[in-house]
Amino acid sequence: MSKCKDNPRKPKRQNKVLTVARVDAIPEGRSATVQLNDGSEIALFKAQGKFYAIENFCPHKGVPLADSRLYGSIVECDWHGWQFDLRSGKCLTKPKCSIETYEVRIEDGWIKIVV
Ligand code: FES
């Protein structure tokens, strides 16, 4: 049985709005790693016309989820195929291993993430 790993680089909730990129910097079906000042990380995806921000961490073995393959709004970890719903952070493979999602706002052509 696999246990969920804790993410040492999980962004802390601060109720802060971070401006991270222009909307045209991330094409459909692609992603980016957003590194915060404290070294924590978010994986930012564009899927089906919307932007999603999640922890950049697979709770199976801890690899980053940015750059993993997308199936619609499902991201699949490159290592062993665990799947996560970008909309909810729910782990479809091991429901107890769900991850955090962060609100994304689009303002004046900028992508902003609420941490
Ligand atoms: S590290 Fe094993 S599925 Fe992600």
Image: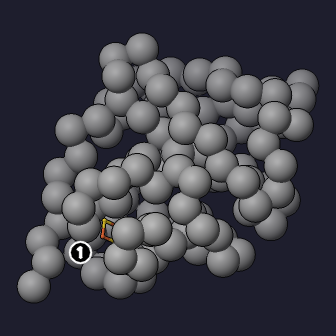
- Residue 84 seen by the camera: no
> What residue appears at the point 73 percent right and 27 percent down from the top-left corner?
21
> What residue appears at the point 17 percent right and 58 percent down from the top-left corner?
5
| Left or right for 81, reference 4 | right
> What residue appears at the point 53 percent right and 50 percent down from the top-left corner?
66
Q: Give the quarter of the image for residue 96.
A: bottom left
The percent coordinates of residue 4 (x first, y second) are 18, 66
Q: Ligand 1: which quarter?
A: bottom left
Give above or below for 16 relative to 52: above
Quarter of the figure that contains the N terminus = bottom left
Q: Give the quarter of the image for residue 93.
A: bottom left
Residue type, mark 1 in image: Lys
Give above or below for 59 relative to 92: above
Q: Nearer the viewer, residue 9 or 102?
A: 9
Q: Nearer the viewer, residue 92 or 28?
A: 28
Tell which residue pokes out farthest to the front in this image.
Answer: 79
Q: Nearer the viewer, residue 57 or 79?
A: 79
The percent coordinates of residue 24 (x first, y second) are 88, 37
The percent coordinates of residue 16 (x first, y second) are 50, 21
| Left or right for 86, reference 23 | left
Q: Residues within 10 Å of mark 1 (few under 14, many from 20)?
A: few
Residue beneath disc 1: 96
Q: Give the quarter of the image for residue 79.
A: bottom left
Determine whether the residue tagged by mark 1 lies in a helix, strand or loop. helix
